Image (cartoon, rainbow, N blue to C red):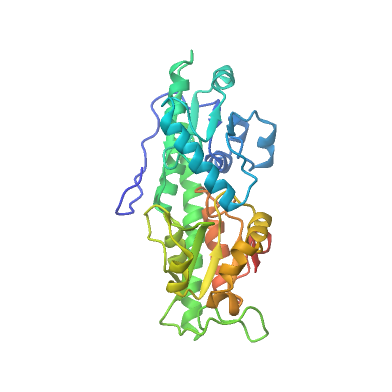
Amino acid sequence: MHNPIGIMMEPAASDSRPAVRIVSLLPAATEIVAALGLADRLVGRSHECDEPASVATLPALTAPRIDPAGTSRQIHDAVGRALADAADGPATTNALYTLDAARLAALEPDLILTQAACDVCAVATADVRAAVCRMSVPTRVLELSPATLADVYADILAVGAATGTLAKAREVVARLRARVASVAYLVRAGKGQGRRPGSAPADGGRPSDGRQDAEPSRIAMLEWLDPPMAAGNWVPELVALAGGRDVLGKPGEHSHWITWDDVIAADPDIVILVPCGFTLDRVVAEAESPAIRNRLKMLRAFRTRRIYAVDGHHLFNRPGPRLVDSLEVLADLLHPGIFSFPATPRFARTL
């Protein structure tokens, strides 16, 4: 679904009967379904789907094979061991997640929403398709694999087409685009008023990064902490829309492993921690651990109090409608005094 030139290609309306029994195996897809007003059509979910709150009553069809409650390093090591063991074992077994194929079949869905972007983040599409092959009812599998904001918009339209709600999907996308345009406009307007990017208002607030209007704040977005990973895909795009310059990630490209020496060498003005799958409290706890805090202390951003913890699980790592919330939080952190979005105090904290 990713297209390199960033043009959103709208799907044709589905010729088949619109789906009425939906299983979502991806949190972002669940939120897309809810945004289209179809939460009542959901009959099953993944273990990570938690928005809207009503989905908690639905059967969870996936489960992790490793303990997701550990530290960054513990999870990283466990994933490495699981993948190594799987490479030596049967190819039919997913190393990181289980899928309850029997329960999935019993739900008789006519549409399953899954992903084809990252086998570490969610159950593999191959496992889903294998389960569907054994089902007695005709079931469509719609794979979502966004890498940019345009891809996310296209995913919303694709779900709309599959569910007979394409007109509603167009409305949702239009509203999201308008919010994005509003943030980008206000960022430009704020710079045009002579404010330094990231500078605090006259009555106090977070300190300035000291850079002039012509030079955007240099941002490091970390999607994992031990070892560190530079956030990619849509994240550098969000940084640019918020008026910053991502010094580690590249728009539309996968997140990639780096070292703390790389972070230090990049000398970012602002560091934002958004570990994949971590809620805000977990990010803060991880950042305050000796293993990570000693690294953060080596950064100039630590001395200027420009390091922020953000709930990566519900925002930046969830490529659905709340990527626009992520942009708004990012703009709020980069430009205090210009913005004040309700999601910021809920999902972000200064370290």
Residue 156, placed above or below residue 204: above
Residues 286 and 129: in front is 286
Q: Does the image show residue 348?
A: yes
Task: Name the quadrant of the N terminus.
Answer: top left
Q: Does the image show residue 121?
A: no
x%, y% of residue 222? 51, 61
Task: Name the quadrant of the C terminus.
Answer: bottom right
- For image coordinates 55% across by 74% down, the residue present is 298
Residues 231 and 323: in front is 231
x%, y% of residue 213? 45, 83
Which residue of the protein is positioned furthest toward the top in this rendering? 136
Query: Left or right of 147: which side holds 325?
Result: right
Q: How many marks?
A: 0
x%, y% of residue 129? 43, 25
x%, y% of residue 290? 64, 64
- For image coordinates 48% across by 65% down, the residue present is 260
Query: Left or right of 323: which side holds 248?
Result: left
Residues 316 and 287: in front is 287
Which residue of the protein is positioned furthest toward the left in this rendering? 5
Residue 241, placed above or below residue 298: above
